[in-house]
Image (tube, rainbow, N blue to C red):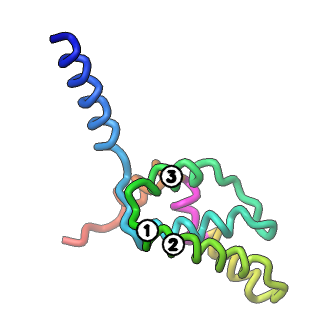
Amino acid sequence: MKFVAIISAVAAIAAAGSANAVEMKDIEYLQAVRCHALAGSSLVKADTAAIDALLRDQSYGRTPHVQERAKTERARAARQARSGDEAVQAEIRNEVAGACQVWLGGEESVKAARAAAPSAD
C-alpha cells in the first residue's frame, strides 16, 4: 500500500513539473537551435546556459526528422557565423541581439514573451 502511495506521489510531482514546462512547436525548437548555434559562435560568444537547458528539455520526444533538421540548422548557422562577409556578420549580430533574445533567456523568457504576446483568438 505504501508503495502505491509513493508511486502516486512521484507521478503527481512529475506531472506538476511538466505542466509548468514550456511546450515548443517544432518550428520554435528549430529557431532556438539556430540561435544557440549563432550565440555560441566565435563571432558572438553570448552566454548560452539558459538556452542549453531549454534545448536539453525540449529535445526529448522530437521526431527523428526534426532532430535531423536541427542538426542541419545548427551546421548552417555555424557556417554562416564563420562567414567573412561584413553584411552577413552584421545580420547575425542583429539576429542574436533581437530575435534570439527570447530563446537565449531560456524557459522563463519564453513564458514571459508568450504571456505578453497578444492573443490569437
- CA gap, disc 2 to disc 3? 18 Å
The percent position of residue 47, horizontal first and vertical second, equals: 69, 53
Quadrant assignment for the N terminus: top left
Does dot 2 land on a helix, a strand or a loop? helix
**Position above or below: 97 against 46:** below
Looking at the rendered image, the disc whose residue lies closer to the viewer, 1 or 3, is: 1
Q: Residue at x 53, y 71 (%)?
A: 70
The image quarter containing residue 72 is bottom right
Give the residue at mark 1: 64
| Camera-nearest residue between 108 and 55 | 55
Total marks shown come to 3
Q: Residues within 10 Å of mark 2 (few under 14, many from 20)?
A: few
**Position above or below: 21 against 102:** above
**Position above or below: 83 against 61:** below
Question: Which of the numbered marks, if any, corresponds to residue 68?
Answer: 2
Residue with the most extreme left position: 1
